[in-house]
Amino acid sequence: MNSEGWGLQRWANHFNQMLNLANPPNRYRFDVGRLAMETTAQMFPGDPIVKVEEEDLEGFAGALVPAESRTRWGIAYGKGQSPGRRRFTIAHEFGHFLLHRKKYPNGIHSSEADVDGRTKIEVEREANEFASWLLMPLDDFRKQIAPRDKPDFDAIGNCATRYEVSLVAAVLRWLRYTERRAVFVNSIDGYVNWAWSSDAAFKSGNFIRTSRGPCGASSRIRRRAAAVHAGSPERRRSRCRSVVQSTRQRAFVPEREVRHRLHVAPSGRCGAKIVV
């Protein structure tokens, strides 16, 4: 089979067709690490993935790492990840192997924001989209939540359970196809950490502008947008400040400002909400 030039959706569709034909008992909760090792051994015997394991990655969520011989590859995921988060990270790095290993023969390290897709880096967005298409097939996801539905966290949480991914991964997957004006807001200490808007919400002006640009959903918008991501609260205050839409002055966006503009309910110290 000649897979030269395949894009992320073609690869994801190929594996989903394989899984549909095999029809395993847990169709949407398959072992993605095992899939990566077994299929690459068959399709790319000259440089397959031979190991998937937990590593101390010092601030990175995942990595695609070559052997010294450059004839074997390994996938590493950071310590302490939830099962859903770990599974998505492995799928993300599998995407890097399929799409980018020849361009980056020394391997790739991915941050948490990279794995979520909250980045301007093209290769990271592609690996993120591959993981989303592989783990959460659009045709099945749309059967769970139709494009015009108005879901709550319970409905999206059911999807996260169905596909064994994190709640954030399921929310971002839904935001990329919904026809509703919806915004996902992640906050810490009453301030917006990062947010993501559906395409319909962005086009109608319902988004939170950060110091790196507005957070939108479509591929055209994502080229200009990146969400804020940092480590400690102190570093968030100094490095990842949000910009209130009506002014050029850099500052945190208080949650009360978001509630006023988007009609959302207040949260505690750390929170996440969907505004529809």
Image (spheres, helix red, strand yellow):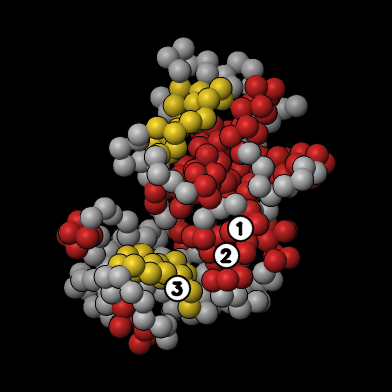
CB-based contact (under 8 Å), mark 1 and mark 2: yes
Of tags 3 and 2, the one toward the viewer is: 2
Crowding at mark 1 (Cα within 10 Å: few <14, some 14-19, many 20+): some
Identified at 44% across, 33% down, the residue is 54
Q: Position of residue 106 (x, y in %)?
A: 41, 24
Query: Which is more toward the observer, 67 or 82?
Result: 82
Labelled disc at residue 161: 1
The quarter of the displayed image where residue 149 is located = bottom right
Q: CA distance from mark 3 to mark 2?
A: 12 Å
Q: Position of residue 67 (x, y in %)?
A: 45, 18
Labelled disc at residue 157: 2
In the image: residue 70, left or right of residue 212: right
Of tags 1 and 3, the one toward the viewer is: 1
> What amino acid is labelled 3 in the image?
Lys
Labelled disc at residue 273: 3
The quarter of the displayed image where residue 4 is located = top right
The quarter of the displayed image where residue 213 is located = bottom left
Q: CA distance from mark 1 to mark 2?
A: 6 Å
Query: Which is more toward the observer, 121 or 93?
Result: 93
Q: Secondary structure at mark 1?
A: helix
Q: Is residue 122 above or below residue 106?
A: below
Q: Is residue 259 above or below residue 101?
A: below
